[in-house]
Image (cartoon, rainbow, N blue to C red):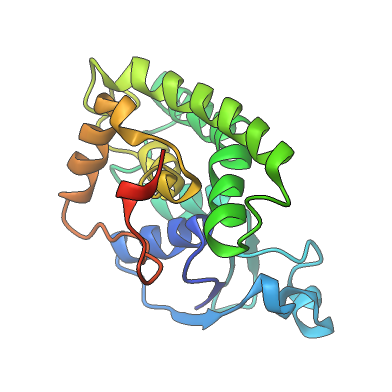
Amino acid sequence: MKLYGMTVSGNCWKASQILRLTGHDFEWIETDTQRGDTQTPAYLALNPQGEVPIVVLDDGTVLTQSNAILCHFAEGTSWLPPAGLARTQVLQWLFWEQYSHEPYIAVARNLVTYRGQKLAQAERLKQCAERGAKALGVMERRLSGHNWLTDAGPTVADLALFAYTHVADEGEFAMADYPGVQAWVARLTALPGITTLPRPEGFSSATSR
C-alpha cells in the first residue's frame, strides 16, 4: 500500500493517522503540491484531481479525498459507528469540516505560515479569520460540554477536525478563546497512537493573535 502526501498537510495527516491506528503497513511517498508533484502526467494518471492525499491499495485501486479515506479504513472499528444515527452524526461533522472549517482554518495557515503571503492576501485572510472563528465557535459550543464531537466517543469526526484545528494558531487564530476546543485537542492527543503535525522551525504560538 502506498500513501502519497505532504508531511505538513492536515488532510494527508488524516490518511496516515487512520492507517496507523488501524494497523496498516504503508509506504509514504512525499508529494509536494507547491513543487508541482501533483501535476505530473504520472500523478494525474493516479488522481486526475491533482490533489493529495491518495492511497494506492495493493491491487492498484486508488482512494482519494481524506475524509473518504478515513471512513474506508475505519470501517469495522470503534472510529466509525455502524450504519445508523450515530454514523450519520459522524458524517455530518465530516461534511461540515470540508465546507465550513478546512477552507478557512487550513487556508489561513497555508497563506500565513507556509506561503508568507500575509500582506498580499490580506483580504482573503480577513474572510478566513471571520469564517474560521465562526467554525471554531461551533466546535466550542459542542466541546465546552462534551468530550467528543459525537456521543459515540472518539471517531473519525474528531480526527478530521483535529487535523487543522490543532495547528490553527499557525493561521493566527487565538486558540485561548476556545478552552473547550483546547481541552478536546489535549484529550485526543493523549490517546494511544495519535500523532501531531510538525511545527515550522522557530514557530511560536505566542506570536499568534
Query: Residue 189: where, in percent of width, then height?
Result: 22, 50
Residue nearest the observer in this picture, 113 or 2: 113
Is residue 52 visible to us here? yes
Q: Tell me if residue 97 comes above or below residue 85 in the rendering.
A: below
- Asked whether, in this view, residue 138 is left or right of residue 59, the answer is left
Query: Residue 11: where, in percent of width, then height?
Result: 53, 55
- Asked whether, in this view, residue 52 is left or right of residue 207, the answer is right
Query: Residue 151: where, in percent of width, then height?
Result: 28, 22
- Asked whether, in this view, residue 208 is left or right of residue 99, the answer is left
Residue at x 75% of width, y 68% of height: 47
Q: Tell me if residue 82 comes above or below residue 144 in the rendering.
A: below
Occupied quadrant, residue 57 = bottom right
Residue at x 43% of width, y 44% of height: 168
Is residue 75 visible to us here? no
Q: Tell me if residue 207 comes above or below residue 113 in the rendering.
A: above
Occupied quadrant, residue 185 = top left
Residue at x 51% of width, y 31% of height: 91
Q: Quadrant of the C terminus?
A: top left
Q: How many marks?
A: 0
Residue nearest the observer in this picture, 106 or 37: 106
Query: Residue 149: where, in percent of width, then height?
Result: 34, 27
Residue at x 48% of width, y 56% of height: 10
Residue nearest the observer in this picture, 98 or 89: 98
- Asked whether, in this view, residue 96 is left or right of residue 179, the answer is right
